[in-house]
């Protein structure tokens, strides 16, 4: 097949080829088109071999601690518990509170360090956190510092400054720890500060309202814009299952919420938001909501979901129960459904009530409708159906 | 731990299917590691194929270095999805140029004009395979036989997925020059295929 003789390729045909041979389109024996399609074929596994190294570089630059840092710090054994308490005690002795621990984990390290340690082949602080952040490791770490003043110095936040969510999470742990210690000294109950339940209980404890006035939490209060907001803000950045006072979540500053990185926000469980009234939810900035996981979002009321960008909603719709789907405006649905793979689209459409379905489908491109089972197209205008 | 890994894998899939490239870039700029993973999986195969033509077997090394620079500069990037593809291609090209400077030997290999390959082309396995559903490697291998400016123009348009204007920006040339180079490249490729 020498349909393409040397020199016979014309410029418009060349432009068309350069614009891309759609994958899957039969190239019909045209060797040049076959060649270009092969060059642009879907990725091969071998072409992703450097992924982990790239991620390590990304972590080094973006200083997002391992997303499971919080979980890793949960107490798993009595020995770990003792070690964690020792770290807390040592930190207190240093006068810098638990932030001394934070300093050793790198969470407070200024971003400038990244360029010196961040090499694609060298494991870096944030990368090594990912593999193991056991309490025992942390307990041994203060000793590796040259002096107490060094770790304390790096960690003490400037008075009243705004904390990043990552830094705030560390300060929140310290706040919870302090509350627990305050309570324990009066009623003698066991100290279990680092478990998720322990953190929740501490943030919900009345003693917090006094502890939070301690100067070391002034930045946390500034970040949450009010001491009353601190417990809920802490609940979010520690991605706890339950917030202390969900009713007032809407009072949190939008800027602080928007600044919570996706690595943290995506771990906030849906249960944390269940007690939040719709009025509070509707005050949450879209930039924050967009970073929540699809399961967490799927529990939100339709009025809140309708505000989300189509690209985010697209990931949520497949998980939404029929009752929630039914409350979304047709236009919002169509926006999010546009570009969905046929299988997913079929699932969503089949859960829409007939009335909403006939409103939504005409807004989708005909190519999308053509892939749907005929039964779902019932009720659409004949003119539309005949054009499919 | 496994559960966390699974959740993350689910999220990567969700981002890849439900978020367009520009939104994914924005998520990654905010520190979303899963989004960065999605970017890597989309961009790296394209960059690797492009680099293979410029630096041959060192493509993987140069790609690693490219990602280090992408991670460093990510926050400073502004633009849409085409802009991002172009930006990453520019970084890859700059890394490749540095690499070639440090390894002159390879520079000479890559710069070899296509005429010098002509005796290799006729009846060659690569060309034969091209006619019957060829592999990506073979396709890239054939494109690598073009003069460098033509090979780059063809790859930026078809593999990286840029339009002529964006490709011109990457190459520091005028769009017209890139159009012509790509056109000549395609003609030469059909010559090679017809032999």
Image: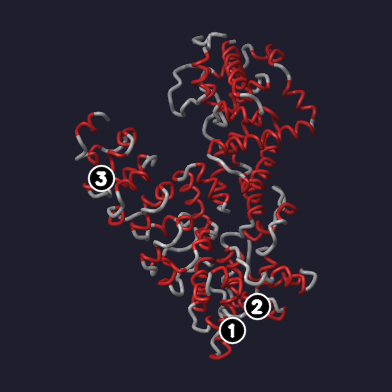
Mark 3 = which residue?
A357
A181 relative to B195, above or below: below
- Residue indicated by mark 1: A181
Chain at numbered mark 3: A
Kindly indicate the quadrant of the structure image that contains residue B42: top right
Residue where numbered disc 2 is placed: A88
Near mark 3 (Cα within 10 A), the count class, few <14, some 14-19 or many ≥20, is: many
Q: How is the image coloured?
A: secondary structure
Spot occupied by residue A163 in the image (x, y as percentages of width and height): 61, 66
Q: Choose mark 1 or mark 3, whichever is in front.
A: 3
Neighbour tally class for label 1: few under 14, some 14-19, many 20 plus, Cα within 10 Å: some
Label 1, label 3: how far apart the Cα atoms are: 57 Å
Residue B34 location, x and y as percent?
54, 50
Query: Residue A363's x, y, as percent?
Result: 30, 39
Split into 4 quadrants, where in the image is the C terminus of chain A?
Answer: top left
Q: Chain of mark 1?
A: A
Residue found at x 53% / y 91%: A187
In screen coordinates, is A358 left or right of A81?
left
Frontmost residue, A93 versus A359: A359
Q: Which mark is residue A112?
A: none
Q: CA distance from mark 2 to mark 3?
A: 58 Å
SS for callout 1:
helix
Q: Are marks 1 and 2 in contact (CB under 8 Å)?
A: yes
In the image, residue B173 sits, relative to residue A257, either above or below, namely above
| A219 displayed left or right of B103 | left
**Mark sitting earlier along the chain (1/2):** 2
Subunit of label 2: A
Q: Of the residues under marks 1 and 3, which one precedes in the sequence?
A: 1
Q: Mark 2 packing: few (<14 Cα in 10 Å), some, or many (20+)?
A: many
Image point 30% across, 50% down: which residue?
A329
Side (left or right) of A68 relative to A334 = right
Q: CA distance from mark 1 to mark 2?
A: 10 Å
């Amino acid at each position: 097949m020498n349909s393409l003789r040397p020199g016979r390729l014309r410029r418009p045909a060349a432009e068309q080829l350069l614009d891309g041979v759609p994958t899957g389109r039969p190239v019909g024996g045209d060797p040049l088109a076959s060649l270009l399609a092969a060059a642009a074929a879907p990725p091969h596994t071998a072409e992703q071999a450097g992924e982990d190294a790239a991620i390590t570089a990304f972590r080094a630059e973006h200083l997002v601690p391992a997303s499971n840092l919080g979980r890793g710090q949960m107490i798993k054994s009595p020995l770990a518990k003792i070690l964690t308490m020792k770290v807390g005690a040592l930190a207190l002795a240093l006068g810098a509170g638990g932030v001394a621990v934070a300093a050793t984990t790198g969470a407070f390290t200024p971003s400038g360090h990244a360029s010196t340690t961040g090499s694609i082949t060298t494991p870096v602080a944030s990368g090594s956190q990912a593999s193991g952040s056991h309490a025992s490791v942390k307990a041994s770490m203060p000793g590796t510092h040259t002096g107490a003043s060094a770790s304390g110095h790096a960690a003490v936040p400037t008075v009243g400054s705004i904390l990043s969510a990552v830094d705030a999470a560390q300060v929140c742990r310290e706040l919870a720890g302090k509350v627990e210690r305050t309570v324990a000294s009066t009623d003698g109950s066991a100290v279990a500060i680092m478990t998720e339940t322990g953190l929740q209980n501490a943030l919900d404890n009345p003693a917090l309202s006094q502890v939070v006035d301690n100067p070391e939490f002034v930045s946390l209060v500034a970040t949450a814009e009010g001491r009353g907001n601190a417990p809920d803000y802490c609940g979010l950045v520690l991605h706890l299952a339950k917030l202390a006072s969900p009713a007032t979540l809407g009072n949190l500053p939008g800027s602080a919420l928007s600044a919570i990185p996706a690595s943290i926000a995506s771990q906030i469980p849906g249960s944390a938001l269940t007690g939040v009234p719709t009025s509070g939810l509707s005050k949450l900035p879209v930039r924050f909501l967009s970073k929540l996981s699809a399961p967490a979002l799927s529990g939100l009321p339709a009025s809140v979901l309708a505000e989300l960008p189509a690209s985010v909603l697209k990931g949520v719709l497949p998980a939404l129960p029929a009752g929630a789907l039914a409350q979304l405006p047709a236009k919002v649905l169509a926006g999010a459904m546009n570009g969905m793979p046929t299988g997913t689209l079929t699932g969503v459409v089949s859960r829409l009530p007939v009335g909403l379905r006939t409103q939504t489908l005409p807004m989708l491109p005909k190519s999308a409708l053509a892939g749907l089972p005929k039964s779902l197209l019932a009720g659409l205008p004949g003119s539309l159906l005949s054009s499919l | 731990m496994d559960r966390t890994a699974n959740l993350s894998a689910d999220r990567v899939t969700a981002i890849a299917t439900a978020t367009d490239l520009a939104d994914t870039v924005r998520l990654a700029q905010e520190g979303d590691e899963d989004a960065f993973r999605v970017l890597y999986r989309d961009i790296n195969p394209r960059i690797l194929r492009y680099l293979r033509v410029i630096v041959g077997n060192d493509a993987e090394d140069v790609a690693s270095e490219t990602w280090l620079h992408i991670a460093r500069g990510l926050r400073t990037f502004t633009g849409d999805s085409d802009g991002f593809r172009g930006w990453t291609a520019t970084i890859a090209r700059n890394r490749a140029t540095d690499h070639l400077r440090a390894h002159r030997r390879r520079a000479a290999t890559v710069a070899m004009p296509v005429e010098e390959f002509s005796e290799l082309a006729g009846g060659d396995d690569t060309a034969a395979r091209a006619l019957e559903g060829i592999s990506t490697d073979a396709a890239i291998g054939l494109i690598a036989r073009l003069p460098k400016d033509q090979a780059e123009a063809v790859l930026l348009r078809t593999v990286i997925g840029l339009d002529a204007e964006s490709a011109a920006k990457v190459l520091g040339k005028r769009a017209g020059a890139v159009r012509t180079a790509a056109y000549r490249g395609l003609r030469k490729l059909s010559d090679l295929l017809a032999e």
